[in-house]
Image: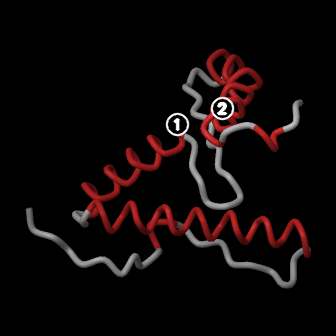
Amino acid sequence: MFNTSYVPIPAMYRTHEQEKKRMYNQRVIQVEHATFTPLVFSTSGGVAPEADKLLRNLANQISVKRQENYSHVISFLRRRYRFDLLRTSVISLRGHRSLSKVHRLKDLDLNLEKVAY
């Protein structure tokens, strides 16, 4: 790899996306007959372009399915990912303190109100 201290953030995202695609895309297409979207995030909460597209698409599908406001859903997803990344970073530095619960997305209460279109 190379020294990333002088690389602009968008270029760093692009480099990591290309590296993940190089490593996994061929196998996903041939073995799983699927498409591959690399999820690249920074530890400060930044999101690479392809991951951002995926989050927007996911938020749109959830908002339509649950009949909720898109802006509330995308805000929830971004916040959730950022806190999960923060938690992962802290765990990698300090280790686990206790057993954590796993929540399914459909069981979560997003605290969103229904919006009539």
Q: Residues within 10 Å of mark 2 (few under 14, many from 20)?
A: many
Q: Which residue is mark 1?
A: 50
Q: Which residue type does callout 1 highlight?
A: Glu
Q: Could you tell me which residue is drawn at 67 percent across and 39 percent down?
A: 8
- Specify the label residue 106 is tagged with: none
Q: Quick check: 104 left or right of 40?
A: left
Residue 114 location, x and y as percent?
20, 74
Residue 26 location, x and y as percent?
69, 17
Q: Along the line of sight, which residue is nearer the eye, 73 or 16?
A: 16
Q: CA distance from mark 1 to mark 2?
A: 8 Å
Tell me the quarter of the picture where residue 27 sits: top right
- Specify the label residue 17 is tagged with: 2
Q: Could you tell me which residue is drawn at 39 percent across and 60 percent down?
A: 74
Residue 10 location, x and y as percent?
60, 38
Instruction: State yes or no: discs 1 and 2 in contact (Cβ < 8 Å).
Output: yes
Tell me the quarter of the picture where residue 36 sits: top right
Give the mark nearest the N terminus, 1 or 2: 2
Placement of the N terminus among the 4 image quadrants: top right
Coloring basis for residues: secondary structure
Placement of the C terminus among the 4 image quadrants: bottom left
Q: Is residue 88 above or below residue 97?
A: above
Q: Which residue type does callout 2 highlight?
A: Glu
Q: Could you tell me which residue is drawn at 61 percent across and 60 percent down?
A: 45
The tally of labels here is 2
Residue 102 location, x and y as percent?
65, 72
Tell me the quarter of the picture where residue 80 sits: bottom right
Which residue, as the protein is rendered here, is positioned at the far front? Answer: 6
| SS category of the residue bearing label 2 | helix
Q: Is residue 55 above or below residue 37?
A: below
Q: Quick check: 12 left or right of 99?
A: left
Q: Is residue 106 above or below residue 5?
A: below
Q: Quick check: 17 left or right of 47?
A: right
